[in-house]
Image: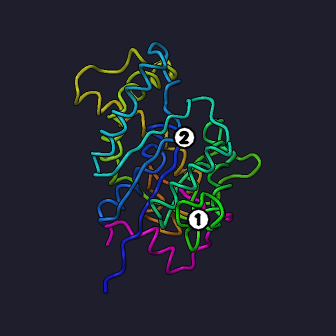
Amino acid sequence: MPEQLPRLLVLGAHPDDAEYYAGGLISIYRELGSEVKLVSVSNGAAGHHQRQPAELAAIRPVEAAAAGRVIGATYEVWEHPDGDLLPTLEIRRQIIREIRTFAPDLLLTHRPNDYHPDHRAVGQAVQDASYMVTVPNIERDIRPLWKDPVIAYMVDLFTRPCPLRADYVLDITDRLDTIVAMLACHVSQLFEWLPYEDGVLDQVPSGEAERLAWLREWYTGKIAARANRYRKELIAKYGRERGGQICWAEVYEISEYATQPDEATRRRLFPVEPSTR
């Protein structure tokens, strides 16, 4: 009997967090045929300089669904208010229910010490839920899991109180087109709000091809520091020649608050990229 493909759940704070931080690994899972679900815990209704929250709350689920269709993944946006997330009991219970229902083998989320309060809230809520998914008397109407999934934190470069540990590094050079295609679906963010925040809104082109080229340059510039920070780990995985030349990478730390994978499980959940087989 063939081994069942691992299931991947991503719990981000906002629509577009999943692909911005983990689009490479997400695309590999889908290429290998695994089921992937992306969730934004907030409604994304705060992030804009002109659009009002009610308008954004209607737009962002549509954008997220379009991004999911790029790779054939479900993308769900919850209704908690953007900018006001806290690791409340309500959100913890909703996350418990989501984990039990989807039953992921691997769950990706933010670290609890990320820069954004919404990111921290989601990371903390996932941490608080990770063991409780196995407790029968919590959320009794949904069958508990026998064990919690492996949980990994998506990359960040913050150092206080401690830097992210690189348990898995991934060269995403061959994944950039897919990641950019997903990000481009979030028009209100990648072509409006974030360029406004960066002071480059006047540089966003109007033509579709030109916008994609501009977005690729913007995104790769934003993430270039990842590979430089984790160069040693990239060389250890890919060898000195390739590892020394990688410009764009994703990095993950396995959470100590959930299931600890053995080496065989690590290889299953963090597969060798199909293009390098």
Residue occupying image coordinates x 46% and y 51%:
22
Q: Can you give x and y, in whole percent of width and height, for residue 82 in the image?
A: 55, 30
What amino acid is at disc 2?
Answer: Ala
What amino acid is at disc 1?
Answer: Asp
Q: Which residues are magenta?
A: 251-277
Q: CA distance from mark 2 to mark 1?
A: 22 Å
Report which residue position mark 1 lands on: 167
Q: Can you give x and y, in whole percent of width and height, for residue 184 in the image?
A: 33, 34
* Quadrant in the picture for the N terminus: bottom left
Residue 256 is a magenta residue:
yes
Residue occupying image coordinates x 40% and y 53%:
37
Q: Is residue 198 above or below residue 107?
A: above
Q: Quadrant of residue 141?
A: bottom right
Q: Which comes sooner in the sequence, label 2 or label 1? A: 2
Residue 207 tag number: none
In this view, the residue farthest toward the front is 141
Q: Is residue 122 above or below residue 97?
A: above
In this view, the residue farthest toward the right is 161
Residue 23 is a magenta residue:
no
Q: Residues within 10 Å of mark 1 (few under 14, many from 20)?
A: some
Give the structural element (helix, strand or loop) at label 2. loop
Report which residue position mark 2 lands on: 13
Callout count: 2
